[in-house]
Amino acid sequence: MEFVVEPVVSELFKGLFKILESKEVQDFARNLVGVDSELKELGEKVQMVENLLGNAEDKQLTDKRVKEWLDNLQDWAFDAEDLLDEFAYHASRRKLKAEHQASSSKVMSCLRASFPSPFHMGSKIKDITCRLEQLQQKRSAEHEMQVVSGGTSSNVAAPQRPEETSSVPPEQVVHGRVEDEAKLLDRVKSAQPSGANFRVIAIVGMGGIGKTTIARKIYNHMQVLEDFKFDKKAWVCVSNNFDVLTISKAILESIDSSPSIPNHLNEVQLKLRDTVNQKKFLLVLDDVWSDDYGQWEILKAPFKAGAPGSTMIITTRLENVASAARSFVTYPLKPISDDHCWQLFQEHAFGDGSMAEAHEIHHSIREGLIQRCRGLPLAAKTLGGLLHSKPWDSWEKILNSNIWSTSDKSDQILPALRLSYHYLPSNLKRCFAYCAVFPKDYEFKENELVLLWMAEGIVQSSDKQFDKAGEYFRGLCSRSLLQKSSSHSSNYVMHDLIHDLAESVFKEFSFRSEKAIIELPQNIKRMRHFSYISDRFNGEKKFIGLEKLKSLRTFLPVFMRPHHFFDNHFISAMVIFYLLPKLKKLRVLSLEKSTITYLPDSIGGLMHLRYLNFSYTMIKSLPESTSQLLNLQTLLLKGCSRLVNLPFNMRYLINLYHLDISGHNSLKEMPSRMKELKNLRVLSNFIVGKESSLNLEDLKSLSSLQG
């Protein structure tokens, strides 16, 4: 069976064709002198370039020039999409005004009266067409000169950091770790080092080798031993944020039944010391990255009061972390054997009821599969999940893919994992890569990610787009690229190595900040997506230079640790009144949990906006200019306790799909004529006002509501 491996840009081209073929856009273009012909020429050029995409995804693995061409083409496609989206916006506005004038003598004051001149729009379309023609000529010349051969891969690994974990085992059987388990259990039961009430055991190994799995095995094994009991147990995923107070509170929450946990380090550590005093405890600190000896000494201080036999197990990729923690035992975890690797692969490739099928696989293919996995359990699991849905006659081709022979020795992303991305359908490639907008350790809900996919145009707009997005989400889960959280059944997470992979393909057009002040990337002109971990105080300096990102589509704060919904985060007024109006291409804007009380009218000028999140803010109302956001799909106003009213002309939000006004607010009634929101599928609740009969008639007319 032949597989066509499509580059991501092919999915963007589908979106361009959809806009170009829209009847609304074509009708509007006919009324603008010269614009109609420019649009037709653009469509023809797009079709011609699409024909050049064959094999480009495979060739970029071995030729850096092809990858650069694809990146340039994707950058062009984003710009073209923005331009055509602007054109489609004006077409929708023209149609809406015409419909309004036909049914009413009143002027639509909430919508701008003027339209861009034909010359202005025609000039923009001509410029974007010329850029595409240059890219086409470059690629055609390379074909003719037959230079698309050899070369080097330009993929570079992103820094690796750990994922959120828990003590709950996701697997039924752990392959190849019987000896490791026995040795570590002996270390836990062995005599205490002289002069210490507790010891540190460090499990060290590379990412994906199974450190968390074996630590979880030991942790749960100790629960069933009769001759070696622990009085207190706790499992904490530390990750790259080695904050003594945060870690100490997490441990205290696990081992102390008290409903209140102090917020100051001194109080927390005093309570920890009292809780473990003369008690034998077992602590697991998973995915630790800090080698700060001073911080380790502070963290360990309360546990010196524990009873002899107490143990702290840490897992880390770095030996110097074990040294800084003063580990009693440092246990290097090795790759599993070929046989065990094959067993694990079979489990994920064939399923529980089909193990007999494995005997029909040719020996050379079996050996090739084992070799590719390098004894890493994560690689065996992921490769098995990939091949599970592929016919056997395609396995050899996949094994011989150029992706295995990348010459970039600094690339720490396993070829077995990169292959999972390479063979994804182009629509799933965009969905997968977008997950890198979230930081490591971030747990997200399906609905949260799906609404963002829709807003970014990753899922093409249609009556069934939410259902389609759900299919894409489940497609990523079935390939083990997303997995359910062990601690929260409704949440999902991404393994650290999988996240590294997503970052490696997403970094060309996005960046994420995890620092107090944003460090702009070098290729700022290409940046489309920006997310940041929100602090309690997000001052003006944090966002310096962000106005240079003229093509930015995403402005998204992320909240990492458990938090109270009503704990607001300060954000500088400069962001609201100066920065955001400059980011004309925004499609996703979130100011969730910020201290804002009102918004400027300029928000109505962000014509590309599809997603607005003002949940848990202190806003009292949205400016009436919000009604100009004809592309808006998602409006989240959850928990806005001071919210008094919604825009009077909200009925003009003709593409609104999801409206959430749940939680406590001060709304008295819904805006009139809500029944005109024909695309509304999700409405959290409907507030009936004084004119209840009219309100209820509106609600009754919203026939497309699903929840």
Image (cartoon, helix red, strand yellow):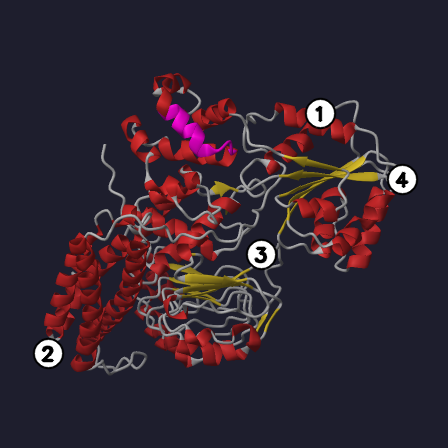
Q: Give the residue at mark 4.
A: 195
| Label of residue 224 in the image | 1
Judge left or right: residue 432 versus residue 665.
left
For label 3, count other residues whose C-alpha is less than 10 Å away and answer few (under 14), some (14-19) or many (20+): some
Q: Give the residue at mark 3.
A: 560
For label 4, count other residues whose C-alpha is less than 10 Å away and answer few (under 14), some (14-19) or many (20+): few
Sequence order check: which comes first, mark 1 or mark 3?
1
For label 1, count other residues whose C-alpha is less than 10 Å away and answer few (under 14), some (14-19) or many (20+): few
| Label of residue 488 in the image | none
Figure quadrant of residue 418:
top left
The local secondary structure at tag 1 comes to loop
Sequence order check: which comes first, mark 2 or mark 4?
2
Write down the region rendered in magenta: 365-376
Residue at image position (44%, 76%) is 547
Residue at image position (23%, 55%) is 14
Residue at image position (31%, 30%) is 396
The local secondary structure at tag 4 comes to loop
Name the residue type under label 2.
Answer: Val
Asked if one can make out residue 321 in the rendered structure from this viewpoint, the answer is yes
What secondary structure is the stretch in magenta mostly built from? helix
Front residue (pair 380, 442): 380
Q: Give the residue at mark 2.
A: 33
Name the residue type under label 4.
Answer: Gly
The local secondary structure at tag 2 comes to loop
Sequence order check: which comes first, mark 4 or mark 1?
4
- Residue 367 inside the magenta-drawn segment: yes
